[in-house]
Image (tube, helix red, strand yellow):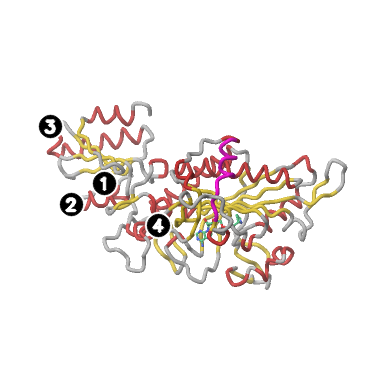
Amino acid sequence: MKMSHYFLPTLKEVPSEAQLVSHRLMLRAGMIAQECAGIYHWLPLGLRVLQKVEGIIRKGLDDAGFHELLMPTLQPAELWEESGRYEAYGKEMLRITDRHDRRLIYGPTAEEAITDIVRRFIKSYRELPQVLYQFQWKFRDEIRPRFGVMRGREFYMKDAYSFDIDRESAEKTYGRVIQAYMEIFKNLGLKAIPVRADTGPIGGDLSHEFQVLAETGESDIYYDGDFDDFTFRGGEEDLNRIKKLYAMADDMHDSALCPVPEDRLKHKKGIEVGHIFYFGTKYSLPMKTTVTNEQGKPILVESGSYGIGVSRVVAALIETNHDEFGIKWPEQVAPFKIGLINLKVGDDQSDRVCAEIYERFRNAGVEILYDDRPESVGVKFSTMDLIGLPYQIIVGPRGLKEGQIEVKDRRSSEKILCSVEDLYQRFLSHA
Ligand code: P5A
């Protein structure tokens, strides 16, 4: 991508309404633009990150054997009346009337919609367990939307729903999701702690939030300091280890009952990037969703739901990966891997070398953003630091005279001088 033709409306000024660093940086880096309170456009650079995050989550869920589908954003009010949540959900739910005076809602979540699908199409215990998921926009009319996409009104969620024949197998499925989530957050470059939580309006009797530690987080959590040294590698053993380690949301923590000695207990702020629930027959009972068991008798299905705030994850990644100059993307979620800076557009040799590097990388399938604008060196450096691509390749007449270009690692700030051949060797030898 050439920057001269790209749509990257970066801002010099820090927008005053934005308090949170991720919100400021997303606006300044031209990733998002506000449409109205709690509702944002995802501009090209931001969308690339959102899609990277989505891809990593999708892979983790597919690897776990779950199946993707896509449900509409709009749902009929009747489904919510069946479950009893139409009134209960209150003002957070956006209610819409169509031209025939039919009542619709813009889904804040989709337990009812998916339960309806299962009751229509799944008939036998043989078809279970089943875990279905989607990526879809949600709307919740939060009283105080704030912090940009961290707490929006319209936001992008991955929501999964599980169906089992009994509690025992439902708990196994719940464990499979925890494992998949640990793997996913690790692959995203986030350290997320599964914390015991209250079940809120989704309901049920077992629930965990996935919290990323960050001073700017809105949640209060208490957890066993052993979590800090624990790296999830997968498998049954690690899952059991996680289940045993104490981690509680603020309202679930009771210092009198807490089994962790005081010197090991940590109290920190977190960003809730995921939330999972086991709720048994909360929806299958009122919505009469049964399958036949081995004896041919109808039994209610046992369910859970599992969310990841995909758009919030993008903000959480910035909260945990930035410095005073801008974002420092982990490679796997970066909008481009490489930023190529031409220090002197119009200089024959610089233009030629940049054009060659750009083509070579593009042909090798490496995502590269080429700053070919006739801007000052200062603007180019600060733009590249702001948008946070993992590697900067800096080309100018002075270096080229010595046969050299510069490569800067945005995360470590390490800079090296090398030849163009060395550059290809380093980045393209296995491409
Ligand atoms: C689980 C999936 C649910 O809605 N039903 C389907 C369950 N859970 S939840 O905790 O209410 O939401 C799941 C995750 O979505 C993110 N999230 C938000 N992100 C941005 N802005 C918001 N206003 C917002 N509300 C929820 C969170 O990451 C949450 O864990």
Q: In the drawing, does residue 53 fall left or right of residue 158?
A: left
Lower sequence index among marks 3 and 4: 4
Q: Which residues are magenta?
A: 237-248
Lower sequence index among marks 2 and 1: 1
Mark 1 lies on residue: 371
Lower sequence index among marks 1 and 4: 4
Q: What is the spatial separation of the Cα atoms under label 2 and label 4, in whole angstroms?
A: 36 Å
Q: In the drawing, does residue 136 fall left or right of residue 324?
A: right
**Residue 174 within the segment the image draws in magenta:** no
Mark 4 lies on residue: 215
* Amino acid type indicated by mark 3: Glu
Q: Residues within 10 Å of mark 4 (few under 14, many from 20)?
A: few
- Using the image, determine if residue 177 lies above or below residue 111: above
Who is closer to the viewer here, 59 or 3?
59
Q: Quadrant of the N terminus?
A: top left
Q: What is the spatial separation of the Cα atoms under label 2 and label 1, in whole angstroms?
A: 11 Å
Residue 417 x, y percent position in the rendering: 20, 34
Residue 99 x, y percent position in the rendering: 64, 72
Q: What is the spatial separation of the Cα atoms under label 3 and label 1, in whole angstroms?
A: 22 Å
Q: Are marks 2 and 1 in contact (CB under 8 Å)?
A: no
Q: Which mark is residue 376?
A: 2
- Using the image, determine if residue 124 lies above or below residue 195: above
- Is label 1 in a helix, a strand or a loop? strand
* Amino acid type indicated by mark 4: Glu
Q: Measuring 26% from the left and 46% from the top, which residue is drawn there?
A: 371
Residue 293 x, y percent position in the rendering: 83, 44
* Amino acid type indicated by mark 2: Ser
Mark 3 lies on residue: 402
Lower sequence index among marks 2 and 4: 4
Who is closer to the viewer here, 65 or 51?
65
Q: What is the spatial separation of the Cα atoms under label 3 and label 4, in whole angstroms?
A: 46 Å
